[in-house]
Amino acid sequence: MLPLRLPLLFLLVSVALCQYDDYDYQPASRHGPSGPNCHQDCDCPYNFPTAMYCDSRKLKFVPAVPAGIKYLYLQNNLIEEIKAGVFDNVTDTLRWLILDNNQISNAKIEKGTIDKLSALEKLFFSNNNLTEPVIPPSKSLDELKIMHNHLSKFPSGLLSDKENLTSVNVQYNQLTSDAIVGAFKGSNKMLSLDVSHNKLKKLPAGVPGSLEILYADNNEIESVGAGYLGKLPLLQSLRLSHNKLVDSGIPAGVFNLTSLVELDLSFNQLKSIPEINENLEQLYLQANEIEKFELTSLCKYVSTTSFSHLKHLRLDGNMVTHSSMPPESSNCLRVASDIIFE
């Protein structure tokens, strides 16, 4: 079990703590004087000559990028448009493009810019004014972040050739279930998908079977398809908090997935504890309408070798208390260190 848990830990830490500044960034002043071929509004440190730092300078345009630059930092500016030609010197060498916290819209991205970047590995485009994703042709793309925009559609096929893509984050947009049909097909290496804080009524269809993390909290999801999670045999963390889930929308055994470690169903409308697999370690059910503590949902059988591996269970904000637990609960939940009722 250990080899499975450690990658999840690192992924969870990255997703939770590094939403915006998870690129390896240091202020240019720490790198010493700038190189001679750098754009006048930026810094290209001698000891990191493949990076150009143009962040936090009130720029209104993307400067022309000199040859040899692989890492381009443009976050925290006032950029509204990307003009053709600015990437002509680095079309096949630029690896990282950081454009977070600007004012860029789709209409102001000219042809011959991002659509020519054939070696890009990371594209961060959060906190802008995009209404649909901007995807480079690079097959090396491994991380895509377009959070806090105005995305209302994500056309099918945009990621179909992104065979190295491992992480997609499109939280805080205006995406509906119909707008993302087939959007995430293509990458058999995708580990993390975050579609939280959108307008989804169901979980995204056609997601890669390689997923280990799926976040869809703060949507309008009412149900989970009976065979949905069966197509995700590696899934370890599923977050569905702040949706509209009800008991009738949870088929029997839908969450009984052996790989699942964390399940968050808090802030929904559930009246009963759903059936889970004994391998689950974190279960969040707070702020539902649960009326009864059903031990069989947590442990089908109890023996010296068969018991729940739950470590943390939250039931606060429901209609059950500690006294609702049957006497045999201690045997079922023998490794639980934290059971919260209030």
Image: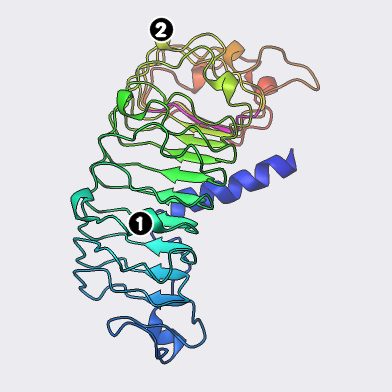
> Relative to residue 130, is residue 334 depicted above or below?
above
Where is residue 309 drawn, in percent x and y? 67, 29
Residue shown at 40%/62% (left/top)? Answer: 97
Few, some or many C-alpha atoms within 10 Å of disc 1 (few <14, some 14-19, many ≥20)? many
**319 relative to 117, above or below:** above
Q: Are marks 1 and 2 in contact (CB under 8 Å)?
A: no
Instruction: Judge whether residue 328 can be spotted in this image.
Output: yes
Which residue occupies the foreground of this view, 330 or 230? 230
Q: Quadrant of the C terminus?
A: top left
Residue 133: image quadrant is top left
Left-right relation of 235 to 149: right
Point out the tag, 1 or 2, that comes first from the N-terminus.
1
Q: Nearer the viewer, residue 119 or 56?
A: 119
Q: Quadrant of the N terminus?
A: top right
x then y, percent, for residue 339: 53, 31
Return the residue nearer the eye: 10 or 87: 87
Residue numbers of the magenta segment = 259-266
Residue at image mark 1: 114
- What secondary structure predominates along the stretch shown in magenta? loop
Q: Which mark is residue 248?
A: 2
Q: Is residue 267 left or right of residue 7?
A: left
CA separation in Å, label 1 and label 2: 46 Å
Q: Position of residue 74 (x, y in %)?
A: 32, 68
Residue 192, compared with residue 48, is above or below; it is: above
Residue 190 lies in the magenta-colored region? no
Q: Residue drawn at (67%, 27%), measured in percent from left and top?
A: 279
Q: How is the image coloured?
A: rainbow
Element type at marker 2? helix
Amino acid at dot 2: Ser
